[in-house]
Image (cartoon, rainbow, N blue to C red):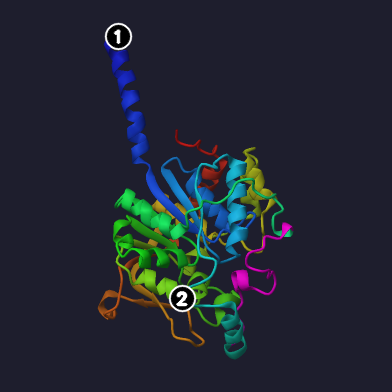
């Protein structure tokens, strides 16, 4: 009996580090507008998972300006007790694309239905964080002194072929990392991103006139071109086509809030009914557990970087038609079991937030 107890004890002691080592390493690169919403919910999808070790969160201008997004991210991590996770400032502006050019293009080629941080409906100066934008309160913590691109490069060298990059905003930071170090893509384990549009079935005004348009690609097309033509070990794409099949409903927010957690109360308080596609949560969740994905296609991807009405549009080729300049073919997720995905997300959000690893 004593031998059995000693065996169980030794097994428990030895399995602790092994389980920790088995956690999948991820760096999140996000345009973290908030409070609430898809961007922050995607961050917490990864942070909440006991199977994932979040090495850091890069924050890039996209849906909102970078500094405002940094404040939302830091504040959320404070609320859930995960200030141990580094929050890294990314690019404040795209590589080439500018607001002035976007507004001019709109006058020439027609309305752009959504411009993110550049949108006139909620415009403010790039490096301001208006109090009205922070109803959840300002964070007490500060972002890291290291920038997102250098952090990503450093981590893939520290953990070669072990780090997945989940990029769910414009690809500016990833393009900068790729230009800083040509080994960056090949040293990462995988690139998972939300971006692009193939042929979404929708009457939504954003894609009615141009079904190949997608905001993350459009906001920084040159960055997306650099990233998509690089050579990664594996690439998984979550396009508009599958994203618009998901909806974060008020009933889901209420169900999560009944868990009594700080996170549940936060999602319900800052629920936004008119923007409920679960773009980024789907990307994070499908990487953790792809079992609810029911259809995918393989395409070589790129982005149109020629100035004109289709600037920033998604380009795709099957194997037989690909041009000479291509990167790694992407697994493009096209359909899902929505009920299974919803339950996966609800279960994660209902769970206590994992404590920092000692």
In depth, the one of 155 and 227 nearer the eye is 155
Q: Which of the numbered marks, if any, corresponds to residue 155?
A: none
x then y, percent, for residue 102: 57, 81
Q: CA distance from mark 2 to mark 1?
A: 65 Å
Residue 347 horizontal side relative to residue 294, left or right: right
Q: Which mark is residue 2?
A: 1
The front one of 285 and 176 is 176
Identify the residue at horizontal 67%, vertical 49% (top origin).
268
Residue 154 seen in the figure = yes
Q: Residue drawn at (50%, 37%), measured in percent from left and top?
A: 354
Please identify the residue farthest to the top as the structure is shown. 1
Nearest to the observer: residue 188 or residue 194: 188
Is 126 in the magenta? yes
The residue beneath circle 2 is: 221
Q: Nearer the viewer, mark 2 or mark 1?
A: 2
Magenta residues?
A: 110-131
Could you tell me residue 255's position as x and y percent?
63, 45
Is-magenta flag for residue 4?
A: no
- Can residue 200 be seen here? The reply is no
Q: Main secondary structure of the magenta part?
A: loop
Task: Name above or below for residue 124 compared with residue 303.
Answer: above
**Near-viewer residue (352 or 257):** 352
In this rendering, the answer to whether 21 lies above or below 233 is above
Query: Mark 1 Cα within 10 Å, few/some/many (few <14, many 20+)?
Result: few
In which quarter of the view is residue 357 placed? Answer: top left
């Amino acid at each position: 009996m004593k031998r059995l107890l000693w065996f169980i004890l030794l097994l428990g002691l030895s399995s602790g580090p092994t389980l920790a080592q088995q956690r999948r390493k991820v760096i999140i690169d996000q345009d973290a507008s908030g409070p609430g919403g898809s961007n922050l919910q995607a961050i917490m999808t990864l942070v909440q998972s006991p199977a994932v070790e979040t090495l850091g969160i890069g924050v890039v201008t996209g849906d909102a300006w970078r500094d405002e997004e940094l404040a939302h991210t830091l504040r959320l991590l404070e609320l859930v007790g995960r200030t141990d996770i580094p929050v890294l400032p990314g690019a404040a502006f795209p590589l080439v694309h500018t607001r002035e050019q976007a507004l001019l293009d709109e006058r020439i080629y027609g309305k752009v239905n959504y411009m993110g941080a550049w949108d006139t409906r909620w415009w403010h100066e790039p490096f301001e964080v208006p109090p009205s934008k922070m109803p959840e309160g300002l964070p007490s913590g500060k972002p890291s002194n290291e920038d997102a691109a250098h952090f990503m490069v450093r981590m893939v060298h520290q953990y070669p072929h072990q780090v997945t990059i989940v990029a769910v905003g414009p690809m500016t930071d990833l393009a900068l990392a790729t230009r800083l170090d040509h080994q960056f893509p090949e040293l990462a384990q995988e690139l998972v991103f939300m971006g692009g549009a193939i042929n979404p079935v929708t009457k939504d005004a954003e894609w009615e006139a141009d079904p190949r348009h997608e905001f993350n690609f459009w906001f920084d097309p040159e960055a997306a071109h650099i990233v998509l033509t690089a050579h990664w070990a594996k690439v998984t794409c979550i396009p508009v086509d599958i994203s618009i099949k998901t909806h974060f409903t008020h009933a889901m927010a209420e169900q999560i809030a009944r868990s009594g957690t700080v996170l549940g109360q936060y999602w319900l308080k800052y629920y936004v009914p008119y923007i409920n596609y679960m773009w980024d949560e789907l990307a994070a969740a499908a990487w953790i557990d792809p079992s609810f994905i029911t259809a995918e296609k393989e395409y070589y991807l790129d982005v149109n970087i020629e100035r004109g009405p289709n600037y920033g549009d998604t380009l795709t080729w099957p194997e037989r038609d690909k041009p000479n300049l291509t990167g790694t073919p992407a697994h493009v997720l096209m359909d899902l079991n929505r009920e299974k995905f919803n339950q996966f997300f609800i279960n994660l959000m209902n769970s206590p937030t994992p404590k920092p690893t000692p």
